[in-house]
Every structure is written in C-alpha cells, then in structure tokens.
Image (spheres, rainbow, N blue to C red):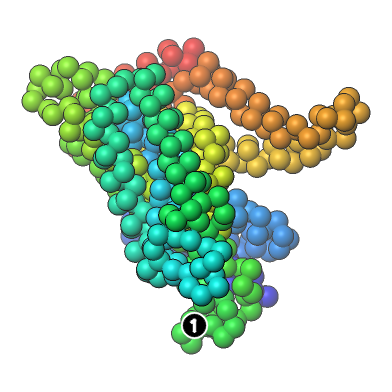
Amino acid sequence: MDQALVAKSVFLAVPLLLLGLKLVPLRWALRIPVALVGAFVLALIISNLLPSGKLSYLVSFSIMAGIYAILTLGLNTQWGFTGHLNFGIAGFFAVGAFTSALFTTAAPTGVMAQYTQQAFGFEAPFLIGILAAAIVSGFVAFLIAIPVLRLRMDFLAIATIGIAEIIRLIFQNERWLANGPQPLRGIPRPLHCLFDEPSCAPGPLATLLQPLEPRDYIYFYLCVVTVLLALTYLLVETATRSPWGRVLRAVRDEEQSAAMNGKNITSFRIQSFVVGAAVMGLGGGLYAHYAVTIDYSHFNPLFATFIVWVMLMLGGSGNNKGAILGAFIIWGVWSGTAFLTGMIEPTLAQISQDLPARSAYLRWLLVAILLAGIVLYRPQGLIAEEKVVSRFLAKTGIGRGRRKQAREEEAETAS
C-alpha cells in the first residue's frame, strides 16, 4: 500500500475517531477500541476510493465547516440559550483572526516595514495566539455588552450590526493596526515544519510523514480544527447543562421569574454574550492560521454573520449537536451551489450576456430560500432543543416524562 495514503489515513482517522466516540452506543471499555479500529479502516477506504484532488477538497471543506461550526456554537450560546439577537458575529470573528495573527507573526523590519504595518508582532506560539484571540474577543464583547445589552430583539440586532461594521472599518482604515486595506501576510501555520524538508519531526513520525509534501499540511490542520472543535463542544455542552446554563434558559424564557428568584439578570446576560464572543474569536484565530493571509474583506457580514445564522436555524437553536450538524450541511449546500452556478452559466449566457457575471447571487438566493423553508416547516431545526438538560433528572422518571411530553409537543408543532 502507498505510504502516502497510509499517512493521510492516519490524519483522517482523528476526526473519524472523535465522531465514533460520540456515536458508537457501547460502554467506554468497548467504545474506544471499536471507534479506533473503525475510524482507521474507514479512513483507509476513503483515501483509496477518492482521487487525490477530491480527497484534498474534502479535507479543505471539512476544515472550513469545522471553523464555521465553532462560530455556530458561539452564536448558540448567545441566541440559543440566552436569546441575544446578535447580528455582529463578523466583528468578533475579525477580532479573533487579527488578534491571533498579530500575536503569532513577527513585527516587520527593514524593507518589509515599508510595505507592511502592524501594531505589534510577538512571534508567539499558535496556542498562545488562539488563546489571545478568544480572550480579546471576549473583552471586546464585555465592553460592548454593558451599553448594548440594555436593548432587546430588533434594536439589539441593529446595534450589533453597526458595531460589527465599525470593527471591520477600523481594520480597513487604520493601517498602523493590521496593515489596513492591504492584506496581512505570513501568518504562521502550527507545526508546518513537519512537512518541510528537512522535517522537524522526531524519528518514527518523520518516517510516517516523509512521503507527504508541504501541500498535504491540510490533513494535519484538519486534526487541529477537529480537536479544538471537540474541546469547544465539550466545554459549551458542559456549561449549558450546568446550573449556569439552566439560568441562561430561565433568563431567555422567563426573565422576570428568574429575577424574582434572585438571579442577577444583567450579569448572566453579559456572561453569555462574552462566552459566545470568545468562542467566535477562537474560530477567527483558526481561520487566520488556515488562510495565512487575511484582510478586512474576509469578514463580510454575508459570509461571517448571515450564513452562521442559517447554520444554527437549520441545525437547531439551543442544541449544540444541531449547531455543528447545521454548520456542515449549510457549508455543503454553499459549496455545492458553486458547482451548480458554474453548470448553468452557459444557459444564463443565452438569456443575457450580463447574467453569468451575476450567477454568484443565485447562491445567496438558494440559501435564503432554504432559510425561509426552515422557518416555515422546521422552526425547531433538525435537532430540537432538549427540554431536560440536567443529566441527573434525565435518569429519573421525571426526566423521562418530560422528554416524552417534549416529543409530543414537537410532533404537534411539526404537524
């Protein structure tokens, strides 16, 4: 068997293993070996069946879908659990991306300083960069939350849209901060030296990676994104099932009742907003290190806000598993419509010479129609929110009764 395919299969097995650990319905003593063997066998099958180009496309697709899944988890913390109508996702996405880029790149010197300007460059490790991205995004959200969270619903949405545009325009016009309208280049990729020649990998690992080329780095970065997505999911899922998460639901559903029970409504609203923004900042940091070169145009509201909302609405607001599922499905729809518009361009050209240039807008039209269909026919999403989130109650008769009642209510809503 080709050694390069074996090496690629090892990297592909990591996300499949994490998925198997979640889905295989066995005890942990059996689940781990079954998931491990199944993941590697499935990875080998995929690597052998798909041509190299299609396999690389699948990996790149999964990386971007994973980054969007992290953004969707952040939005779910804000909207799904607390009811914050945040239309400023692009702002926190941009803050996280530029923060991680500034922390991990070197400050330009010599001739480069004439073409590239940035506020600082610490050459920090990748983990420090994405941690800084989450912290700075959370801090910016805290400063914004104090005045903005006094608003509700439509007014909050308008305010967050405005703030996101302000952040984007700051990065566009303040060249001293992150090179302004010019791209910020040379953002390092973590452990890229593993795929260089000579490799920095230790003996056995160097032997495994030897047949791979620098362009195969995306297989490793898929593992990085998948592991961070899994950790983010575990943290958010644990937090939202804890007493803190149940208070957020109480604030969302019955704010006055929660206040009467002694809960500090303002504090909990700010906390959820900050946590969600920090998760979005983490997604921005991962995007920056994947793209290597970023500028303000990458954080357009359509790509960094609207599509994230569609992902959450499809997957299921208030359900973290649904948020991840929706991110992968909608990114698949978005990627698939690129091929669709390419196929119909000759037909559009026969109607009018101007239409092929506008075919990209058909992609947004299809996504908008999909969103309308979700709202009309499946408002709860593909995976509805759980009514009983306490693991203790879920094991009792009370929890089972509430779950049965929730399923009956969901069936009535669907019909």
Q: Give the residue at x 63% y 38%.
A: 334
In the rendered image, the vertical position of residue 373 relative to residue 121, given as above or below: above
In the rendered image, the vertical position of residue 145 relative to residue 255, given as above or below: below
In the rendered image, the vertical position of residue 217 relative to residue 342, given as above or below: below
Where is residue 328 shown, x and y percent of the image?
A: 54, 42
Where is residue 118 shown, x and y percent of the image?
A: 45, 60
- Report which residue position mark 1 lands on: 200
**105 relative to 197 in the view: left or right:** left
Where is residue 34 shown, x and y percent of the image?
A: 45, 59
Secondary structure found at label 1: loop
Q: Give the residue at x 54% y 70%.
A: 112
Q: Quadrant of residue 107?
A: bottom left
> Would you call the spot at circle 1 few (<14 residues within 10 Å), some (14-19), or many (20 or more)?
some
In the rendered image, the vertical position of residue 173 relative to residue 160, given as above or below: below
Where is residue 111 shown, x and y percent of the image?
A: 55, 73
Q: Give the residue at x 71% y 35%.
A: 360
Q: Nearer the viewer, residue 7 or 102?
A: 102
Q: Quadrant of residue 317?
A: top left
The reply to whether residue 367 is in sight is yes
Outermost left residue = 262
Name the quarter where the N terminus is drawn: bottom right
**213 relative to 124 in the view: left or right:** right
Q: Nearer the viewer, residue 174 or 369?
A: 174
Q: Give the residue at x 19% y 37%.
A: 244
Outermost front residue = 114
Q: How many marks?
A: 1
Three-letter code for the amino acid on which mark 1 is drawn? Cys
The reply to whether residue 386 is in sight is no
**282 relative to 64 in the view: left or right:** left
